[in-house]
Amino acid sequence: MSCSCDDTYSLLSNKAFLSSNHELRVKKFTTPDSARQEAESTREMMGFLRVNEDGLHEIIGKLTISDGSPNAPSVPRESPHLEENHGVAFHTHPYHSRRKYNPPTTQDVFIFAIFRTFAKKFKKKRHKHIVFAPKYRYVMTDIGISERIERMIQTPSPDPKEFVKQVIAAATRVFKTKSYETHFLQTFSDSPGLSGVDKCKDNARVSFFQDEEGLKRYLRFFKNYGVLVTRHMRGSDDVV
């Protein structure tokens, strides 16, 4: 069947996800290398998705691949004014033998908020961001964060590069203030596990979730800030 990409973005969470050949490409970055018997991987891939004529998603445009490094984001996050104009972006979270869920990090949510706000201002297609983890895919959707950030910018610049700076400053006041940090740490003070859900140094104190209820509370937490994060089994349309 044929479909309109714009119409399908709103239904993305409920659609079968990747065509088989693209699913295999993503799987290489979310499963351990059996030959090397890795307990942990830092390899990540980042790119964009579009809907093909069969209603399945496939990778399109520039693809960024990185082997990663400790204490740094594994995939470079370019400024929004350099992004390709596709409705859905994605990146992978690597396999780790002691990480059960691999959800989006606080930094992932922060970056999504910036890119989404920029996209609305300059009428770009960016609607969602997907994190592919070994067992799950996580879909991030704007349910008010871009409007919140827009209200914080008194005189939006018509220049894309200057507007990016304004958006980053506003998003920082939302996600990187003492009040946000206090709210976050108080909410998850009882969460067991390792410190950090990825290797990004900005997430050094993000609790790592081994129990499902803790994970669900973590994903719901971002609704307070205007970001909906839903979790889906890989290869399934159902919300977990």
Image (tube, helix red, strand yellow):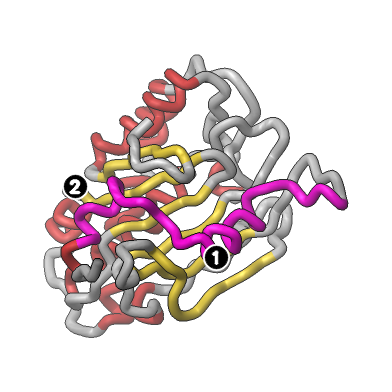
Q: Percent position (x, y) of residue 207?
A: 54, 29
The front one of 138 and 124 is 138
Q: Is residue 77 above or below residue 138?
A: below
For mark 2, does the 10 Å Cα neighbourhood hold few (<14), some (14 to 19), or many (20 or more) residues? some
Q: CA distance from mark 1 to mark 2?
A: 32 Å
Residue 165 point in image, percent of width and height:
33, 71
Residue 143's label in the rendered image is 2
| Depth check, front residue: 168 or 193 | 193
Give the side of residue 168 with respect to residue 61, left or right. left
Q: Is residue 72 visible?
A: yes
Q: Position of residue 139 (x, y in %)?
A: 36, 48
Mark 1, mark 2: which one is toward the viewer?
A: 1
**Disc on res. 21:** 1
Which contiguous range is marked in magenta? 8-35
Helix or strand or loop: what does disc 1 sit on? helix
Q: Please give the name of the residue rendered at 43% of the width and 68% of the height, measured from the top-left corner.
A: 58
> Foreground: 7 or 103?
7
